[in-house]
Amino acid sequence: MAGVAWAQGGGAAAGPSPIVSMMPIALMFVVLYFLLIRPQQKQRREHESMIENLKRNDEVVTSGGIYGRIQSIADKVVVVEIAPNVRVRLDRAQVATVVKGGKPEDVEKGKERS
């Protein structure tokens, strides 16, 4: 008696392990961290340091783009003179940058030459 040999397919191929399938997603998070999150943290720290080191008579630019000179500084408020006898009270965090090199007119002329 000959036995009947039934043709049986081989077992289904095992899928990749869950760890291997999660690797591309984890890699994307690492790339996002180094390209987006880390530089933002560094920029925020530099801005906070600049805000802490503000002093009277510094030439500054506000986040609204207004140039002025700091007249007085309190805990959270900065008084900026934007024209002769024109002073504006600002939240300290609204100072965007400190102008290096003198008057705002000098900075504008320097940009025109470039």
Image (tube, rainbow, N blue to C red):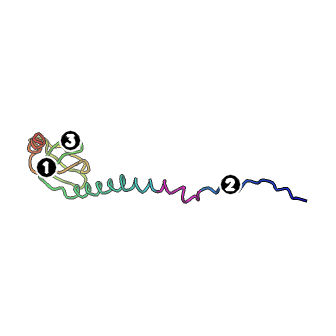
- Mark 1 is surrounded, within 10 Å at the Cα level, by few (under 14), some (14 to 19) or many (20 or more) other residues, namely many
- From the image, tell me which residue sits under label 2: 12
Say which quarter of the image contains residue 109: top left
Mark identifier at residue 65: 3
Asked whether disc 2 touches disc 1, contact meaning CB atoms under 8 Å apart, the reply is no
**Earlier-in-chain disc, 1 versus 3:** 1
Q: Residue 21, which numbered label?
A: none
Identify the element where label 3 is drawn: loop
Q: Position of residue 68 (x, y in %)?
A: 14, 45
Three-letter residue code for mark 3? Gly
Q: Count all numbered tags in the image, as a single digit.
A: 3
Tell me if 38 is positioned left or right of 75 in this view: right
- Specify whether residue 22 is painted magenta: yes
At 15% from the left and 49% from the top, the residue drawn is: 99
Say which quadrant the N terminus sits in: bottom right
Which of discs 2 and 3 lies nearer the camera? The answer is: 2
Residues at marks 1 and 3 touching, judged by CB atoms closer than 8 Å: no
Residue 108 placed where, x, y %?
12, 41
> Residue placed farthest to the front in the image?
2
Q: Residues within 10 Å of mark 3 (few under 14, many from 20)?
A: few
> What amino acid type is highlighted by mark number 1?
Glu
**Mark 3 or mark 2, which is nearer the start of the sequence?**
2
Residue 52 position, x and y percent, is 22, 58
The kind of secondary structure element at disc 1 is strand
